[in-house]
Amino acid sequence: MTKTKHVLNVQSRTLTGSANARRLRKQGLIPAVIYSKGAEPETVAVDAGEWEILTRGELNLISLKEGEKTQLVLLQEVQHDFIRNCASHIDFMAVKNDQKITTRVPLHAGHAAPAGIVAGGQLEQNMHEVEIECTPDTLPEHIEADVAPLGLGAQLHVSEIALPEGVKMVTPGELVAFVVTDPNGSADAPAASGATEPEVIGEKAK
């Protein structure tokens, strides 16, 4: 599925530290940092209400807007305040349209039910996200796997998932993403390994 363009308004901030972060949160703002290659991190603040609305859907690539200035970023990490049930800090990674990136995207089953369901089987999803490599302009919102042909006891490996043009799978192809279990004897599926944090190719995120 093609990505949706997400735009998020930000405002620069010069004061840092926990006391200033608490002050921002009381004002309905979330402190955030934009990391980029060859430059010092940029500290900004995000409106908490706008962020909450934006994160109701799937979110990875974002266009940060401050006045007339826009900057393309990947969502890198969100820290949560679980007591107040809200985001307390956000990290972004600046990217360029012609720069290849690796990131995780959600993995969904296609809308058509597997053939094995008719025989009493049950579809089980072993992986809920995969890691891919692409340029920002080809980054999909999520990857949808065609599970319709799966019969009773059949498995769908990562290598069998069709990808949009310009997207390369990084998650190991031998891992099993979906399986239709047989009520008379479940199919064995290897556990999915953990995916890495989103990062720009060739560099570690700060």
Image (cartoon, rainbow, N blue to C red):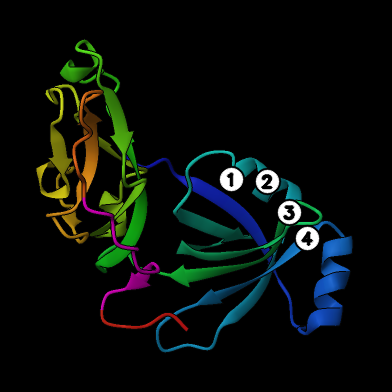
Distance, label 4 to label 1, CA atoms, is 15 Å
Please, what is the dominant secondary structure of the magenta stretch?
loop
Task: Residue 7: give x, y in percent of width and height.
Answer: 54, 49
Distance, label 1 to label 2, CA atoms, is 5 Å
Of marks 2 and 3, which one's residue comes earlier in the chain?
2
Q: What is the three-letter code of the residue carrying label 1?
A: Thr
Horizontal side of 137 relative to 10 (left or right) equals left
Residue located beneath label 1 in the image: 55
The answer to whether the residue labelled 2 contacts the one labelled 3, judged by CB atoms less than 8 Å apart, is yes
Secondary element under disc 4, as helix, strand or loop, is strand
- Magenta-drawn segment: 190-201
Residue located beneath label 4 in the image: 29
Task: Residue 52: give x, y in percent of width and height.
Answer: 67, 46
| Residue 33 position by quadrant | bottom right
The answer to whether the residue labelled 4 contacts the one labelled 1, judged by CB atoms less than 8 Å apart, is no
Secondary element under disc 3, as helix, strand or loop, is strand
Q: What is the three-letter code of the residue carrying label 3?
A: Cys
Task: Residue 39: give x, y in percent of width and height.
Answer: 47, 88
Secondary element under disc 2, as helix, strand or loop, is helix
Task: Residue 26: give x, y in percent of width and height.
Answer: 89, 62
The answer to whether the residue labelled 1 contacts the one labelled 2, judged by CB atoms less than 8 Å apart, is yes
Residue located beneath label 3 in the image: 86
Could you tell me which residue is drawn at 35 percent across and 49 percent down?
Answer: 129
